[in-house]
Amino acid sequence: MRKFFKKMLTAAITAGCLIMPVSSQVEAAVERTPVTVTNARWYPLYHIAPYAGWANDPNGFCVYKGEYHFFYQHYPYDTKWGPMHWGHVKSKDLVHWEHLPVALEPNSIYDASGNGGGCFSGSALEKDGKLYLMYTGHVDLPVLTPEGVDRIESQNIAISDDGITFEKYAGNPVLYAPSNLGNIHGGDFRDPKMWKHGDTYYVVIGSKNKAGDRAQMLLFESKDMLDWKFKNIMAYSQGNEGTMWECPNFAEIDGQEAIIMSPIGMKPEGKKYLNFFQAGYMIGKLNYDTGVFTHGKFDTLDYGFDFYAPQITQTPDGRCILIGWLDMWDPPTGNIFSEYTDGWSCMMTVPRELHIKNGKIISVPVPELESLRIAEKSYRNLNISKKTKLDGVRGETGELLATIDTSLANGFSIELRSGGSEKTVLSYDKSSGLLKLNRDKAGGNVTGEREVKISGNKINLQIFLDRSSIEIFVNGGEAVMSTRVYPKTTSQDIIFIPNGGTVNLENITFYTLGEGIPQPVIK
Ligand code: FRU
């Protein structure tokens, strides 16, 4: 297999249309000019975003020498997806982040191929005081293999002594698709997520079957993180659970286990799964002897518009924390995001702590985020029977806590980032139990409506607003809805609207939040 890989790469180079010599690629990279942020109107105040340029999937989320490190798929030279690099930030508290130099560049034979390749997604783990990254090197092939495969996706290691500068391992690639060991596709084989159990290292990798109609997660094991052995197909999709699982994770949550994945190819079920791709989980148990994960059904992790490729890290104090990409692939529009003319594209969610309750994963914002609160305005027990704005409850950024009792009404709406004709509307209808998020008037190039069924008279909301994003946590994490929005900076009102009676605003608290990510300097 290794020989086949080398042969394919050599054939590609000989064909003359694939790979430049490594040295000239490095020179080419130096000649290009990284983009800079030219307008900060939608740039987040406290969410992770690239210092400039493009960002997609979270990568390498880990704790190293007592600090959180977080990497992301990054293209520094444009605000569109391009040959993938790894951007890098770190933080002592999951809240205040510092930008670090780009950690990985696509400049090796196994990760560079013109416009289609790069250092694709992966993960990080500490070993003997060093930080190991494992990432997918993606190389497009100029011709299809006899199996009909158009790419080589191999797994590669980069190692750092200081958590800042990474050196690619001389023995790369360390893993390639074991298509001779079962019904495994030879091309799609990416996004390794490592963890340690006992004295053994494990990695799950996203894949599919040869026919391309079944997603699967492959499990490998190693004693040193360099020499890996295939263990088994750890889990695979059934029914409408997707045809390829990108960005898989294995998670330990409250003493239980779950796999988290980002399926391609799921079809809408009523008003569920309307996004182009999905992100969700299955709770179960891994048998480390057989390498098989027995599990329940797929469920989604976020009911909004923009949430993909989440990655978890396990913290020393036993928590499981997740950050997702707060955007969504949209090939029909060319994956162009409204901020793309401002010198940057895409951002991450706030860190979310995962728990398991009644057989479901719930996500809540990490409590560390409370350290961003710098001013507070609170109201208690207000009965409203018409549209109401509350003094001091407004902003283009901020955190809103709301406990709303609809015992004497049919429901309510809250207009967020409202001003002129702009608004993003969250509405609850008690009789159907549906909570809906509508962004038809949210600005930029976004539209549409998403919904989730909840129930009860009293609804609890925790809402994070950040210039071009809204994340809504419902009833202590029972449901989450995330979306990008692109209103004018002046559209800052929050309006409470009762529906069919009097609504009791039992608690409304609005926090002004401070800075969590360095703000771009506009020249
Ligand atoms: C998911 C994904 C990954 C891949 C990366 C490339 O969003 O397609 O599977 O590694 O993006 O940027």
Image: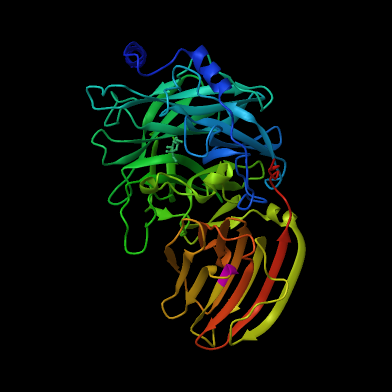
State whether residue 75 appears in this view. yes
378 versus 465 height, above or below: below
Q: Give the range drawn in magenta.
A: 415-419
Name the residue nearer the viewer: 212 or 217: 212
Q: How many labels does the image show?
A: 0
Residue at 37% in and 45% down? 331
Q: In this view, does 449 lie to the left or right of 266?
A: right
Residue at 72% in and 75% down? 391
In which image quadrant can residue 268 be found? Answer: bottom left
Name the residue nearer the viewer: 444 or 406: 444
304 versus 283 height, above or below: below
Q: In this view, does 169 lie to the left or right of 259?
A: right
Name the residue nearer the viewer: 256 or 262: 262
Name the residue nearer the viewer: 294 or 159: 159
Residue 187 at x, y percent in the picture: 33, 29
Residue 33 at x, y percent in the picture: 58, 28
State whether residue 57 appears in this view. no
Q: Quadrant of ligand 1?
A: top left
In which image quadrant can residue 53 be found? Answer: top right
Q: In this view, does 510 lie to the left or right of 412?
A: right
Residue at 58% in and 47% down? 320
Is residue 100 on the magenta stretch?
Answer: no
Outermost right residue: 375
Q: Which quadrant: the C terminus?
A: top right
Q: In this view, does 137 lie to the left or right of 103?
A: left
Residue at 58% in and 41% down? 343
Residue 467 at x, y percent in the picture: 62, 56
Q: Looking at the magenta stretch, what is its main secondary structure?
A: strand
Q: Which quadrant: the N terminus?
A: top left
Residue 464 at x, y percent in the picture: 62, 60
Is residue 418 on the magenta stretch?
Answer: yes
